[in-house]
Image: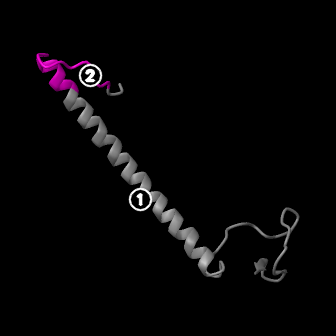
Amino acid sequence: MAFEPKLDWAPKTPVTETEIIRWEKGIYDAHVLMSLHTAAIASLQIDVKAVKDALFNNFTDNVFTENLDTLTDVQVISGWYDEGNKRLVV
């Protein structure tokens, strides 16, 4: 259940056990979400670094796992197809 803030506090509003439990649950839920987001951000940073590294070295250190037995689904616009080794040379 999403945290619902109490926005109608008045100077004499009593703080009950129920309100404190609600606060604690909201704090806990926020920390759980923060942990999930932290892990997702770390994973995305690794992906972005891999893409940046590939772009900076002209893709020369990458191994692609596509089967290049034929070029029926590939259009080569730069480089050439090495028929003997079944690979694209860019």
Scheme of image coloration? one colour
- In the figure, is residue 7 to the left or right of 52? left
Q: What residue is shown with label 1?
A: 42
Q: Which of marks 2 and 1 is in front?
A: 2
Position of residue 81 measured from the top left corner of the image (x, y, whole percent)? 83, 79
Q: Quadrant of residue 11?
A: top left
Q: What whole-number distance in Å separates the C-alpha atoms at marks 2 and 1?
A: 34 Å
Position of residue 78 measured from the top left corner of the image (x, y, whole percent)? 82, 78
| Extent of the magenta region | 4-22
- Is the residue 8 above or below the residue 72 in the image? above
Position of residue 8 measured from the top left corner of the image (x, y, whole percent)? 25, 18
Q: What residue is shown with label 2?
A: 6
Secondary structure mostly seen in magenta is loop
Q: Which of 20 and 74 is in front in this view?
A: 20
Total marks in image: 2
- In the figure, is residue 28 to the left or right of 70? left
Q: In which quarter of the image is residue 25?
A: top left
Secondary structure, mark 1, is helix
Name the disc covering residue 18, or none.
none
* Amino acid bearing label 1: Ala
Q: Residue furthest right?
A: 72
* Amino acid bearing label 2: Lys
- Is the residue 34 above or below the residue 2 in the image? below
Q: Residue furthest front?
A: 11
| Residue in view at x 60 percent, y 75 percent | 54
> In which quadrant will I find the C terminus?
bottom right
